[in-house]
Image: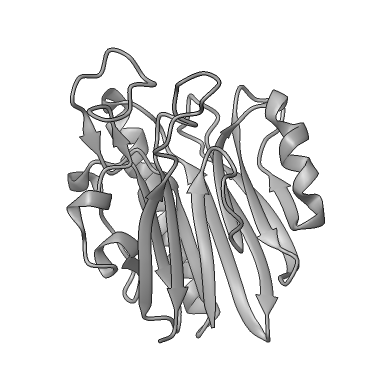
Amino acid sequence: MYFHFLIYRKVCVNPDILFLQEVVDREIEPIDKLQSLYNIYYSNKGCQYYTAILVSKMFDVEKHDVIHFQNSGMYRTLQILQGSIGGLKVFLLNTHLESMKEHRSQRCAQFSFCMDKCREIIQQNPGCLLFFGGDLNLRDDEVSRIPEGVKDAWESAGGDLKTKFTWDTRHNDNKQGYFNARLRFDRIYWHAPLNKVQFSLEGRQRIRSCLCFPSDHWAINATFSAV
C-alpha cells in the first residue's frame, strides 16, 4: 500500500491526495477541470483565499467538515475529509495557519487545536490512516502537543537539509523584501501502518512565460508506503 501526497498552491503532478492553500476564486475553473481525476472539496469559498482537498477517485468519501478557527483574523480553517479505501478508514486534515511572526500566539493555539483533533480521531478510530498538513507557518519552537504515534514526514524521510526549507527567499524571489528567510512552513504529519517515506520539493523551476516560480513556497511531494 502506498499514497502519493502533495501539499501545494498549484497542481503540478498527479498524486493520490492534494492539499492546496491560498486558493482564490479565479483559480477555481482550472482546479474544477480535474474533476474527472479527483473528488474536490473546498473550505470557505468567497473569502480572500481558502484551502482545498483533492482526492483520487479510489477513495470512498463519507464526510467533509470545515472548522473555522475562532481566534483567526485571517478566516483560517481546518478541513477534515473522512473516507475509506480498501476497508481502511482514512482521515485527511488540511489547514493554513495564521501567518506572520507577530501572530505567533494565534498560530500556536491553532496548531494545538489541530493536534488535539488528530489525537481525538486516532483514539476513536484505532488503526486508521491519518494525514495532517498544509501551510502551517510554523517555526520549530512552535511545535507542541504531537500525539503519540504521529510522525513528521520530513524527519522520517531522513531530515535532508536540501529539502528542509519550503519558504526559502534565498532561492525563491517571488516574494520581495524578505532577505535570506529560510523556514519550514509547510509540513505533513501522519499516523498509519506505513513506515517508509520518500520526500522531495517541487515547483523549483521558473514558469517561462513570466520567469517567476509557481508559488513563493516550494511544494511538498511525499510518497508513503509500507515497505
Residue at figure coordinates x 71%, y 49% from the top left: 41
Q: What is the quadrant of residue 136 in the picture?
A: top left
Near-viewer residue (139 or 222): 222
Q: Is residue 171 above or below residue 141?
A: above
Near-viewer residue (160 or 67): 160
Furthest toward the top, the residue is 177
Residue 225: x and y in percent read 45, 79
Left or right: where does residue 201 sit relative to residue 22? left
Furthest toward the front, the residue is 208
On the rendered image, what quadrant is the C terminus found in? bottom left
Residue 9: x and y in percent read 53, 38
Left or right: where does residue 88 sit relative to residue 187? right
Q: How many marks?
A: 0
Residue at figure coordinates x 47%, y 59% from the top left: 132
Residue 74: x and y in percent read 50, 26
Q: Is residue 98 above or below residue 227?
A: above
Near-viewer residue (142 or 190): 190
On the rendered image, what quadrant is the N terminus found in? bottom right
Residue 108: x and y in percent read 31, 42
Left or right: where does residue 136 sit relative to residue 5? left
Residue at figure coordinates x 22%, y 35% from the top left: 182
Residue at figure coordinates x 50%, y 28% from the top left: 207
Q: Is residue 82 above or below residue 11?
A: below
Q: How is the image coloured?
A: one colour
Q: What is the quadrant of residue 189 in the picture?
A: bottom left
